[in-house]
Image (tube, rainbow, N blue to C red):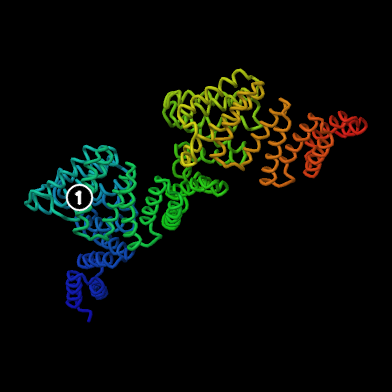
Amino acid sequence: DDHIDVADTLQQLAVSYKLKSDFEKALEYCNQAMRRRKNKEDSAFAALLDLDGQLNVECEKYDEAERCFRESIRVKRNLHGGAHLGVADSLFSLGYVYETFQEDFSKALRCYEECLYIRKSNVGDTGVDVANSYLHLGCVHASQEHETKAIFCFGKVIMICSAEDHEMGAIVDAALVNKGQVLYSQGKCEEALECFQKTLDLRRKWTGKEEDEISEENADVFRMKALVFEKLAEEEETIWTLNLALAMYKATLGDDHLRTATTLQLLADHYLGKNNHDKAFSFASEALEIRKKALGDSHEDTGDSYFAMGTVHFARNEFEQAQPFFEASLSAFIESRGELHITVADSLYYIACIHELNKNTEQAIQCFQGSLSGRQYNLGNEHVLVADVFFKLGMMHQIQESLDLAAGCFRECLKIRIKVLPEDHIDIGDTHFYFAGVLFDNENSPSNEEATQHYIDAIRVYNKHLGENHVSVAKCLASLGNIFEDSNDLVKAGSCYQRAIAIFDQNLDEDPSREDVSNFTLEDDYQALAGALLDWATYLDRSGQDSAAMKAYHRAMKLYNVLLGADHEIMATILCNIANLLGRQERYDEAMSLFDKALKMRVASFGEDHPSVADLLLNCGVLHSKNCEYEDAIATIEESLHIRRSGGLEAGVAEALTQLGIVQGNSGDFSGALESWDES
């Protein structure tokens, strides 16, 4: 049973089953042969170890394959020394295991380098084996982004091999393709195209045909050529080449193959970049269906397709449809790539943007913070995409009136954008604008000087990129008007308001319908115009220009009615302002009618005990007093006083008591007036 001839026969059986691709059976016979070999330190046993290693690779037992090749190297070194070609062959096999299956590239590199050294020492820079060593060494260098070394190795392959020899030609083919990919990653597009074209020319030479053969291998090359054309912005060539690759994949691999899906995805990405959303949607949805069926929902490639579908819907402003796709991509990326991967951060960013648009501010902040952590981890603290998240977080904190947090975010955003973007980039202008708004609104800001400077910087950027009559300039001017008015510089304030409204009127319809402002970008512009009109009206009112103020108030009301509806709180505020103006003109009945209307609106919106209701009641009381309706005035002010006492609003209580004392004094109740003023 343990005769040498039995071992030889078992070894031959193993080789036979290997040729039949029955690797499990072959491995069984190989192991039996190895057990029967008494001498485990000779060349025959080393050959068995190599065979056993090859069969373990086929059976996906890579650790066992590694063990066999390492043992074979040891035996051969003991027999022949370290510079024997047999040692090089086993080193090559071991390197292949490390490179392809275990992804231990540092060990693969050492094996291939030693293998190449031995082969060159024996035969020089010639032959298929030396070329193959250079090829795999180049592939490992490429995977480790050692691009210069990789290109050198692939160049050596091309130099050594003769394309006339088919076996050598296949190695040249692989070297050209891999060299082209490395050149593409370096941005050397013309050189990359040359490599890919040489590959296709070589293949036509083999087949003896003038046209490119329809094959999976040619489809791979055309797909890579398309990526180069995309980078060169050659749109027609990109589309034509991708469609050719797609047709070849479908013809050779089928409509549902994963390489078909990859090419569909590339077409979707291309059309998305060109804002052709219909075609992008068509290709992306087809790619997604293939990947879901072949890989399941949790695979990273499926996640890429979910992300692409979300991006298409987002670009079409279909935010409700986009959200589930981004949530699916987020789930797939977390499971397949881990929570810290950049694609997780990007999915969170889009989900946060949708929450922002839906006014779900708290959820938006949570997602933006997750995106910020992921982008900082992957891109560093000074990347433009990190700045984008800081910008969004600043806006969300501003909405929540967390102005210190908002200011911190805008400050970080501005610092990054100034450092990494071209001078006066439009995004820098936007950051100046929003940062200025936060600084002006923040009571903790020491003065308005910093906010003023940021608005001036924003105007400079907008003038440069958008022109001096753009709505963005108008928004800055209106905000500067607020600052100047707050500083009691009414001349500058009035000038800013007038210029802002003039610019708005050049860009927006004077009498828009609700349909006209349904686009969220236009709605923001009209909101800014309405705010500027109200500020302008208040300024005119304050300056005693009653007629012009009344006209501006009514125009602001008309626009707010379209934007927010007739019952919105801002409408009540404007009615109160108009009522106060009419009261100064001693048109008390008209003024009281407007106060009553505003009061009903505030009670409906906030309830009877809201501070804004108390404010309005106090104004009504003052108006009654001016009209010598002292009983009504006292009753109304006492109602305001009750609300303010209940709410613990001490400053408001003092104000109401002061006004109550004035009315009591005017009505002849001097002791009551003194009592109210004492308490005030």
Residue 135, compared with residue 47, is above or below; it is above
Q: Is residue 264 left or right of residue 625?
A: left
Rendered location of residue 98, percent (x, y):
31, 56
Residue sitting nearer the eye, 668 or 650: 668
Residue sitting nearer the eye, 390 or 572: 572
Residue sitting nearer the eye, 581 or 110: 581
Residue bearing the label numbered 1 = 244
Rendered location of residue 265, percent (x, y):
31, 51
Q: Residue furthest bottom?
A: 1
Residue 506, compared with residue 258, is above or below; it is above
Mark yes or no: residue 133 visible.
no
Q: At numbered mark 1, what does the secondary structure look like: helix, strand or loop?
A: helix
Classed neighbour count for the residue bearing mark 1: other residues with Cα under 10 Å, few (<14), some (14–19), many (≥20):
some
Residue sitting nearer the eye, 626 or 333: 626
Mark yes or no: residue 191 visible.
yes
Which residue is pictured at 50% across the width and 24% down the height? 502
Rendered location of residue 473, percent (x, y):
49, 26
